[in-house]
Image (cartoon, grey):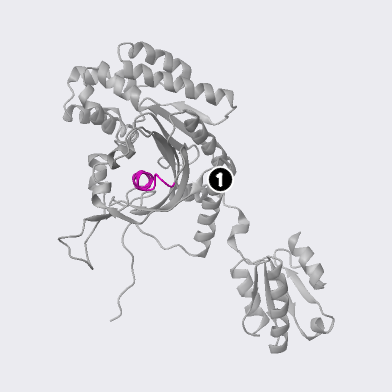
Amino acid sequence: MAQKPSIPKGTRDFGQVEMARRNYIFNTIKSVFSLYGFQQIETPAMENLSTLMGKYGEEGDKLLFRIQNSGEKASLAPEKGLRYDLTVPFARYVVQHREEISFPFKRFQIQPVWRADRPQKGRYREFYQCDVDVIGSDSLIGELELIQIVEEVYRRLGIRVCLHINNRKILAGIAEVIGAPDKMIDITVAIDKLDKIGVEAVKNELKERGLSDEQVEALQPILNQESGIKNQDKLASLKEFLADSEIGLKGVEEMEEVFDLIEATGVKLNIELDLCLARGLNYYTGAIFEVKALDAQIGSITGGGRYDNLTGIFGLPGVSGVGISFGADRIYDVLTELDLFPKELQSATQILFAAFGEEELHYALRWAKELRAQNIAVEVYPEPTKMKKQMGYADSKQIPFVAIVGSDEMAQNKVMVKEMSTGEQQLLTLDELLSAIKN
């Protein structure tokens, strides 16, 4: 009995339509990254497990895919794992190649990552990230450029978004003020789930993580933010709340500078200071971002932040960086739901040659060569079968033009070109056909 073909849960095949759409996303993002001077690198799918462990918090460590050693003595080989994100491998890359790169180092990476998560809508075990980072500078212009990149990418894709921003120093200050400075990680992990589980469940989790009733109560101004309050007013309130916390006030000062830069450069993006935004990853130390689509019910589609010492764990301390990651799979889902993919993506082929006989087929092949030399995507139907079948093929692939070749067309050194959307037909020379397709 033949085995029924299948793939692992949380993974997907991509057909030609999906790949055309995915490349549209990747190419849009790449073109914006390049505008700001970022250049592409790649790192291996697997890393030594020691590179990955302990960088993503307790929840992240549980989601690492471990790879069984094979092909070498298992007892001697370091354990390996599939990469969980692109940021930690990037930090490893920077330290390993520090003699070859110039700082500040601006790089982007578009590659798959793997997480042993429970598959559901918008959450996959294998998915692509599109990361952009600048490392080797403390300047908050890094944060500004990432915000500008977010604005431009989603403007080009036609998705209305809101960028939520916070600062881990503010969260550290809040933990300090409520008398639980050692519980900052517990607080951030819990409040990062606010959108998913609600205020009461977050309070219960905070208590389970060792916070007293009084400390949880002191977090109320943070957990119960009213909507509609201006960002500047939130910062003013925070200054009072964090008056006795040096690190908290430093976070407020950084946020004020970021908002000043946003105003000075005319950024029109919808931006909200969100004090419950925590981002569960332990390596963030400054500004943190999440981007959500306004017209689709899905989680964040972009996220990131500043990290001051991610390279320190690999022996290069004190190098600050900031980066964000665009979730290509979620962006794809949003574009699909909102029907925002350009219609011309359905077919890469611009014209199909359909021939009545073998001689006509050879004639079509010569024309196809000329058109391809002009960078026009051409297919030649490989056998002179019934014209209905050849036209059906063009329809199924949504090819906009069909060039029909018969003995009459050959005699005049022309082809009969049918525009599939209107049914109109014209007898054209090669130059006239070139002009028609380009226009």
180 or 322, nearer to the observer: 322
Residue furthest out toward the front: 99
User: Looking at the image, which residue is at 23% across and 30% down?
Assistant: 186
Per the image, the residue denoted by label 1 is 34
x, y percentage for residue 190?
26, 32
**Which structural element holds mark 1?**
helix
User: Looking at the image, which residue is at 21% across and 56% down?
Assistant: 78
Magenta part of the protein: which range?
86-100
Q: Is residue 82 visible?
A: yes
x, y percentage for residue 10?
33, 56
* Label 1 neighbour load within 10 Å: few <14, some 14-19, many 20+: some
Query: Can you say whether 170 is above or below 432 in the image?
Result: above
* Residue kind at label 1, given as amino acid type: Ser
- The quadrant of the rendering that contains the C terminus is bottom right
Is residue 99 found inside the magenta-colored segment of the image? yes
Horizontally, residue 406 falls left or right of residue 189, namely: right
183 or 334, nearer to the observer: 183
Residue furthest out toward the right: 412
121 or 280, nearer to the observer: 280
